[in-house]
Amino acid sequence: MTQPFLIRSIRRTDYLQWRPLWNGYNAFYGRSGPTALAEPITAETWERFFRPADPVHALVAEQVGELVGLAHFLMHRSTTRIDDVCYLQDLYTVERLRGLGVGRRLIEGVYAAARTAGCGRVYWQTQATNRTARALYDRIAEHRGFIVYTHELD
């Protein structure tokens, strides 16, 4: 039987356990080795979680003192509504616990944080090939068919 897990806000003391989750998340999306994020990006991401005026937040899933998942999200204005919206930017769980409810509980934690902050919507994106995650997402949210384009500015 799997031990229950707790969803909570990240703490400064979590860094040594958060970092491998962050690295795993980035590796999943091809950002490792020569394509890894520059260290200043990771350092700044970490600091943003603890600045009260910063809109970037983090939740973690903890099981018996071990961090087993993360969710990073931010609140922002929208041109299509008065209430702010919440963008779930990063979601990751350790592989051995996938399919056991950690991701769902993290998303539900983001829903609760967004609701508390007065947001009217939570949204996120994933790769079309991420079948495992999409199986969950299709049960707890609505896919509205949008395609995402990006352009890196110099």
Image (cartoon, grey):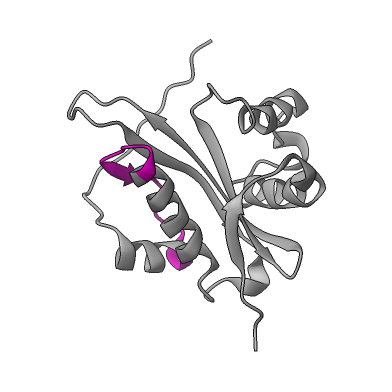
The foreground one among 46 and 37 is 46
Q: What's the residue at 48%, 64% (across, down)?
A: 105
Is residue 129 shown in magenta? yes
Q: Position of residue 108 (x, y in %)?
A: 42, 59
The foreground one among 41 and 150 is 41
Residue with the most extreme bottom position = 1
The foreground one among 18 and 26 is 18
Q: Quadrant of residue 31?
A: top right
- Vertical order, 109 against 85 (above or below): below
Residue 78 in sight in this render: yes
The foreground one among 64 and 98 is 64
Count of numbered badges drawn on the protein: 0
Residue with the most extreme right position = 16
Is residue 11 shown in magenta? no
- Range covered by the magenta-colored residues: 116-132
Q: What's the residue at 75%, 39% (across, down)?
A: 12
Q: Considering the whole magenta stretch, tell me its main secondary structure.
A: loop
Q: Position of residue 15 (x, y in %)?
A: 77, 43
Q: What's the residue at 29%, 41% (across, down)?
A: 147
- Vertical order, 5 against 115 (above or below): below
